[in-house]
């Protein structure tokens, strides 16, 4: 999906939206508190989109004005989404939330819903699990010239967006976690999220982890021996997903395999962020995030932890195949953790 807001003048909103299927004309859903939702099909022919090869017919533009939403200029709150995906892409008016942009780089797979919800309340536009979206979609989100209040969180390939985030005025933060703890929770979460008992929203957090579904079905988490057996029979795709995932998404190009040379690159990227914290020291991360936001955005939100994780992580640390898979991530984390704790000790 690609989109752009060309004008958001208060009396009208104009722009375009190209769905993943460029042969389809987009449909928008407009929501105003206290009113029935409106469905609007693309109503502006954009020949430029057709000529660029972005859309098959060019019928992908829209103009939302008083004829579409009566009293538009006087509304305090309006939301526009793509009808097919429910993807939000235009808040109105821009002053509904203070001007701030935040990207929280969260490497965990299991959603931290309390944290996401607490932070999202302070922004007009909020996007979680952004790794599920294509480069074009993320580029459109970051490059939204009429969106001055945007929150994004997830684990995309950081090198692809770091300069664009900086150019568009985003403050960046990261929350790091011990790789063995993360792997333990990731396996537990994949098992749960792929089951019939899981709510639908968890599926988007499985992006890139699909090959682990069959792996976790071979585990009996109450019998550690089954974990060791399963890790001795990894498929190539499973091994690829499990091989130093933190370093891969933080410092590697799309066609690169993590190596020792990427550790200083990852550390340099982390050093260039506005705030970096640790799962194990979340309370110390709170004031760092509050400083770059200009307010306490977390409130009483806490990290959700699964009690089973520490025991599974302890078993994973004993397995030589797992230690080899996470060796680079473990070194990166240890060096970053030392630097963070030294910084906290000086405060």
Image (cartoon, grey):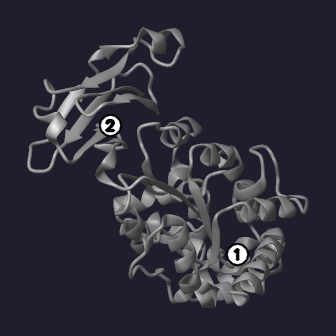
Residue at the right extreme of this rendering: 261
Q: Could you tell me residue 29's position as x and y percent?
A: 24, 37
Q: Residue at x 77, y 75 (%)?
A: 336
Question: Which of the 4 image quadrants contains residue 56?
Answer: top left
Camera-nearest residue between 28 and 120: 120
Camera-nearest residue between 291 and 320: 291
Q: Residue at x 27, y 33 (%)?
A: 28
- Is 281 above or below relative to 50? below
Q: Could you tell me residue 258's position as x and y percent?
A: 82, 57
Badge 1 element: helix
> How many residues crowd around disc 1 within 10 Å: few (fewer than 14), some, or many (20 or more)?
many
Mark sitting earlier along the chain (1/2)? 2
Badge 2 element: loop
Q: Residue at x 28, y 43 (%)?
A: 93
Give the residue at mark 2.
Answer: 84
Q: Could you tell me residue 284's position as x and y percent?
A: 58, 84
Q: How many marks?
A: 2
Q: Could you tell me residue 123's position as x and y percent?
A: 38, 57
Q: CA distance from mark 1 to mark 2?
A: 36 Å
Is residue 239 among the parts visible in the rendering? no
Question: Which of the 4 image quadrants contains residue 47?
Answer: top left
Give the residue at mark 1.
Answer: 179
Camera-nearest residue between 149 and 58: 149
Which mark is drawn over residue 3?
Answer: none
- Is 145 above or below relative to 162? above
Left or right? Give the position of 53 relative to 266: left
Q: Quadrant of the C terminus?
A: bottom right
> How many residues crowd around disc 2 within 10 Å: few (fewer than 14), some, or many (20 or more)?
few
């Amino acid at each position: 999906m690609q989109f752009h807001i060309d004008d958001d003048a208060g009396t009208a909103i104009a722009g375009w939206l190209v769905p993943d299927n460029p042969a389809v004309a987009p449909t928008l859903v407009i929501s105003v508190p206290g009113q029935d939702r409106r469905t609007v099909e693309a109503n502006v022919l954009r020949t430029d989109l057709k000529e660029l090869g972005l859309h098959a017919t060019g019928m992908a533009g829209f103009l939302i004005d008083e004829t579409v939403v009566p009293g538009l200029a006087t509304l305090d709150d309006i939301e526009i989404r793509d009808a097919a995906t429910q993807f939000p892409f235009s808040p109105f008016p821009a002053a509904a939330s203070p001007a701030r942009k935040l990207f929280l780089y969260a490497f965990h797979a299991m959603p931290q819903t309390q944290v996401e919800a607490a932070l999202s309340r302070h922004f007009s536009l909020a996007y979680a699990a952004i790794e599920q979206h294509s480069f074009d979609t993320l580029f459109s989100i970051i490059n939204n010239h009429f969106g001055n209040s945007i929150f994004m969180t997830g684990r995309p390939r950081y090198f692809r967006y770091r300069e664009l985030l900086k150019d568009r005025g985003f403050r960046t933060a990261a929350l790091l976690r011990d790789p063995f703890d993360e792997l333990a929770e990731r396996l537990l979460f994949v098992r749960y999220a792929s089951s019939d008992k899981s709510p639908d929203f968890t599926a988007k957090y499985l992006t890139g982890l699909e090959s682990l579904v069959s792996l976790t079905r071979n585990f009996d988490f109450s019998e550690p021996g089954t974990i060791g057996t399963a890790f001795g029979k990894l498929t190539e795709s499973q091994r690829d997903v499990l091989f130093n995932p933190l370093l891969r998404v933080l410092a590697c190009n799309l066609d690169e395999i993590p190596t020792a040379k990427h550790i200083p690159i990852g550390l340099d990227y982390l050093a260039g962020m506005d705030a970096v914290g640790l799962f194990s020291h979340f309370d110390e991360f709170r004031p760092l995030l509050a400083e770059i936001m200009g307010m306490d955005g977390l409130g009483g939100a806490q990290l959700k932890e699964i009690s089973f994780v520490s025991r599974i992580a302890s078993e994973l640390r004993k397995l030589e195949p797992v230690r080899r898979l996470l060796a680079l991530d473990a070194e990166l984390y240890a060096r970053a953790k030392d630097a963070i704790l030294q910084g906290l000790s000086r405060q």
